Image (cartoon, rainbow, N blue to C red):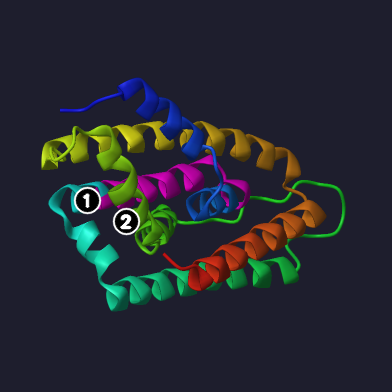
Amino acid sequence: MITHVGAFVAISALIAVIPGPDTAIATRNALIGGRRAGLYTILGVALGLSIWTLATGAGIAALLRASEPAFVALKLVGAAYLVFLGVQALWEASRRSGPRGTGPVARRSIPPRQAFRQGLVTNLGNPKIAVFFTSFLPQFTPAHHASFGALVLLGALFCVIGLSWLTGYTIAVARIGDFLRRPRPRRVLEGVTGGVLVAFGARLAAEHR
């Protein structure tokens, strides 16, 4: 049984618009690789959130939260991956992204499988989601009745809300990227998104539960 569905939806919508690692990698791929790359990144994020939802319902996320070594290990792996993606973007920004002039530069190809993998690993490498799900979702179930079905249903609803926002946002970003795909703006975009990913990785590594 679920209580206060309206409040849950409202709070979930507010949380969904707060930028995080998932938003950063989707933004970067949509700006550089276009709408297709952005949407495949979101599919990866969706699978990651689905896994976290099932893990929360089954109690696995709570075990991860309770295990300091496992939590820290996953956190460091996720942080290292974000830093890797950020450094990769900064490297691309340092290279000449296109011929001099004012003409548009073609999108840099980001294979769908690569975009999907980046979204999936970025999401699964963030154990803060386990902390969030295990503390947030039970608040909307009756006391002592946080069943597998109720937790999974709430997690699925949260995923739908978050991914709906992220999909619309990514499509808009991809359209903006069509206007900014010129040599200098493209280098700036790579540099900014690379720096943001490195910052998220560093913050994830330094954060405590």
Q: Residue at x 71, y 54 (%)?
A: 189
- Mark 2 and mark 1 in contact? Answer it, CB < 8 Å: yes
The answer to which of 189 and 133 lies nearer the viewer is: 133
Q: In the rendered view of the protein, which quadrant contains the C terminus? A: bottom left
Magenta run includes residue 91: no
Q: Main secondary structure of the magenta part?
A: helix
x%, y% of residue 118? 43, 59
Question: Taking 38 as reference, is 105 left or right?
Answer: right
Outermost residue to the top: 6
Q: Residue at x 42, y 34 (%)?
A: 12
Magenta span of residues: 30-52
Residue type beneath disc 1: Thr
Label 1: how many Cα within 10 Å (few below 14, some 14–19, many 20+):
many
Question: Taking 69 as reference, is 205 left or right?
Answer: right
Position of 167 relative to 209 (above/below): above
x%, y% of residue 117? 38, 59
Residue hosting label 2: 130
Magenta run includes residue 36: yes
Give the SS element for disc 2: helix
x%, y% of residue 8? 36, 29
x%, y% of residue 43? 37, 45
Label 2: how many Cα within 10 Å (few below 14, some 14–19, many 20+):
many
Residue hosting label 1: 56
Q: Residue 173: which quarter of the image?
A: top right
Q: Tell me the CA gap for discs 2 and 1.
A: 7 Å
The answer to which of 177 and 195 lies nearer the viewer is: 195
The answer to which of 196 and 120 lies nearer the viewer is: 196
Give the SS element for disc 1: helix
Q: In the rendered view of the protein, which quadrant contains the N terminus? A: top left
Q: Residue at x 44, y 55 (%)?
A: 115
The answer to which of 173 and 67 lies nearer the viewer is: 67
Question: Taking 79 as reference, is 62 left or right?
Answer: left
